[in-house]
Amino acid sequence: MSSFNLTSPSPPKFILNGIPGLEAAHIWISIPLSTFYIISLLGNFMVLFVVAKEETLHKPMYLLLCMLALTEIGGTTCVVPKALCTFWFGCKTITVDGCLTQMFFLYMFVAIHSAVLVTMAFDRYVAICDPLRYATILTNARIAKLGLVCLTRAVLFVLPVPLLLRRLPFCANRLIPHTYCEHMAVVKMSCGDTTVDRTYGMMITFVIIGLDLTLIGLSYGLIIRSVLRIPSKKAHRKALNTCTAHICVILMSYTPYLFTALTHRFGRGIATHVHDLLANLYCLVPPMLNPIIYGMKIKELREKVEKYTGRM
């Protein structure tokens, strides 16, 4: 079988095939896809706008919400515009560098998103378990430093993914059965030894997501232990109510990601179009719903949003 190498002088292009088996429905699929994307952008930009305009919201919790919103805007924008070009205009080709760049930024935003959720769990732990020292432990400057740590960690872990792919020879079949450059879909096109790529991809999934879920679980274990020591049941509900929005976002973020990642590697009996639909829903549904959840659950944020939306 003929092959090509990504380091050749004129590297060929890849072809993003959209959702194989549902080509006739691409236009119909693009309607909810674009609708979810617009709602996601509006919701997350609204969070950024309101927090930026209101000085009373310049607090660690709201700065973390802004970080979360930025990762969701970035992650969806890495995927949706190119997918819509495929569905609407049949623009299926993507350059090798474009494919690897898309992959890098997509997974970088996923890694930052996960790290921000860990930081938010720590924020809830300090707020409930050590409220008197909250203002001194979590200052705005410290949150900014934690954000830089999240970014640095994501870049260091994700950067080897496209760099490892560049060294591989790829088969003449350049068709990616997906709407974006998903790591395993690109790896499966290689004619060379992909052991390192597969191992590293699995490793960062379990290291980043596994470690972050462990830290989140530890934080909530300590929160529950602290709450149970409070004699008042009303205080129990009040303390736990401050965590419900974060818990909902965690469930919506990690559950579909782990399902998508694991089925792509082990779910050989699942149809390709099911993989692709789930992957696209993962990229869109949590970013669309997260601002709504926080807007409903956090009274102060809801009031400020209503203040600005009421003027429109």
Image: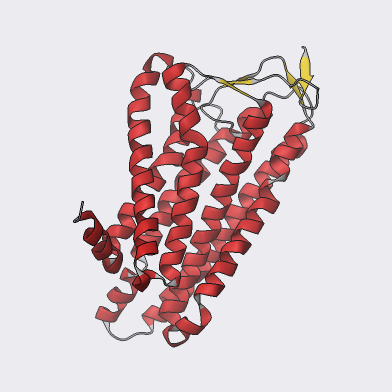
Total label count? 0
Choose between 230 and 42: the one closer to the eye: 42
Choose between 11 and 213: the one closer to the eye: 11
Looking at the image, is 7 positioned above or below residue 257?
above
Q: Position of residue 136 (x, y in %)?
A: 50, 84
> Which residue lies at the image location 80% right of the left edge and 27% below the top edge?
7
- Is residue 254 at least partly visible in the picture? no
- Asked where in the image residue 235 lies, by quadrant, the reply is bottom left
Choose between 111 and 86: the one closer to the eye: 86
- Is residue 256 at least partly visible in the picture? yes
Q: Position of residue 50 (x, y in %)?
A: 34, 60
Q: Position of residue 46 (x, y in %)?
A: 34, 53
| Farthest residue, direction left | 310
Looking at the image, is 116 positioned above or below residue 289?
below
Looking at the image, is 229 positioned above or below residue 57?
below
> Which residue lies at the image location 33% right of the left edge and 42% below the top edge?
39
| For residue 230, side relative to residue 277 (left or right) | left
Colour scheme: secondary structure
Looking at the image, is 149 positioned above or below residue 126?
above
Choose between 31 and 191: the one closer to the eye: 31
- Asked where in the image residue 263 lies, by quadrant, the reply is top right
> Which residue lies at the image location 31% right of the left edge and 77% below the top edge?
236
Q: Position of residue 242 (x, y in %)?
A: 34, 70
Q: Quadrant of the N terminus?
A: top right
> Which residue lies at the image location 51% right of the left edge and 19% below the top edge?
91
